[in-house]
Image (cartoon, rainbow, N blue to C red):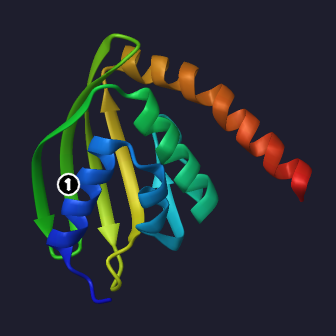
Amino acid sequence: MASDPAAFLSRWHRIVETRDEVALGEILAPNPSLGAPPYWQKFVGHDVVHYLLGVILQTIDPLHYHREWSDDREFALEFSGQVAGIELQGIDLITIDDDGRLVNIDVMIRPADAVAELIEQVTPRMTEFFAARSSTN
């Protein structure tokens, strides 16, 4: 399947709107990377990126996209939402591969109190994920 940026964006928006974690896993490349606030080091690998994006989809509610910019296979998507009642604004920077699958996403969010709340809610779930993953290896 050749890269079709418009088809990817349509599918991405549908996945976010419906919070479809199965479809989310299907649009990820085999070894995607995710830069998430406030971490400098990226998360790399299908399982960890799939899980973390799924957690974020469940934690930011509601999540709405407002504007988007694209350049072939690279996108900047502006969004807003709430985490525990705190308003937030952010940008997803997404790159897709030749097959139309997500190879990289960098997420930037403000303000700091929203990022802090997101960390508080996401960290325990990621800690459990990594603990379970290390116990099966």
Q: Nearer the viewer, residue 24 or 108?
A: 24
Q: Nearer the viewer, residue 37 or 23?
A: 23
Left-right relation of 118 to 7: right
Q: Answer with the quarter of the image where residue 8 lies.
A: bottom left
**Which residue sits at x=49%, y=44%?**
54
**Percent from the top left, x then y, of residue 38?**
48, 34
Amino acid on which the number 1 mark rests in the picture: Ala
Disc 1 crowd rating (10 Å Cα; few below 14, some 14-19, many 20+) is: some
**Helix, strand or loop for disc 1:** strand
**Position above or below: 3 against 17:** below
Quarter that holds the C terminus = bottom right
**Which residue sits at x=46%, y=67%?**
26
Query: Is residue 112 among the parts visible in the rendering?
Result: yes
Left-right relation of 61 to 50: left
**Which residue sits at x=26%, y=36%?**
90
Q: Nearer the viewer, residue 66 or 41?
A: 66
**Percent from the top left, x then y, of residue 4?**
20, 79
Residue occupied by mark 1: 76
Q: Answer with the quarter of the image where residue 123 lies.
A: top right
